Image (cartoon, helix red, strand yellow):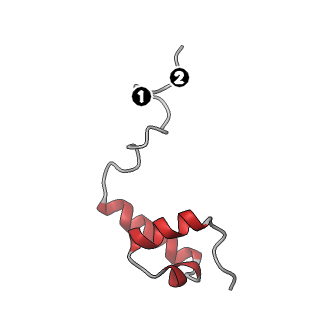
Amino acid sequence: MRPLQISPETAVKLAEALQVPIERLMHMPQHILIQKLAELAQQQPGADSADGSGSGGKNGPAS
């Protein structure tokens, strides 16, 4: 199994958010990582739209 194909900055942020050592994160199977990210997202409701990158809404394109 090869390490995840993510940037070092992303790896550090994910390791901190998931509270796992970075070495363990880099060798974590992708389906397990996705499952843990889904659990993390459920614990933090509203975090998905907080960055303003969603479509539509107040920050949507002007017509």
Q: Position of residue 42 (x, y in %)?
A: 33, 61
Q: Quadrant of residue 52?
A: top left
Q: Which residue is mark 2?
A: 61
Picture residue at 48% right of the left edge, 38% below the top: 54
Picture residue at 40% right of the left edge, 73% below the top: 18
Picture residue at 36% right of the left edge, 50% below the top: 47
Picture residue at 57% right of the left edge, 80% below the top: 29
Report the amino acid beneath label 1: Gly
Q: Nearer the viewer, residue 62 or 17?
A: 17
Mark 1 Cα within 10 Å, few/some/many (few <14, many 20+)? few
Q: Nearer the viewer, residue 58 or 51?
A: 51
Q: Which residue is mark 1?
A: 57
Report the amino acid beneath label 2: Pro
Residue 28, compared with residue 59, is above or below; it is below
Label 2: state its secondary structure.
loop
Residue 22, compared with residue 38, is above or below; it is below
For the residues bearing labels 2 and 1, Cβ distance under 8 angstroms: no
Mark 2 Cα within 10 Å, few/some/many (few <14, many 20+)? few
Q: Nearer the viewer, residue 25 or 45?
A: 25
Label 1: state its secondary structure.
loop
Q: Is residue 28 left or right of residue 41?
A: right
Of the 4 image quadrants, the one containing the N terminus is: bottom right
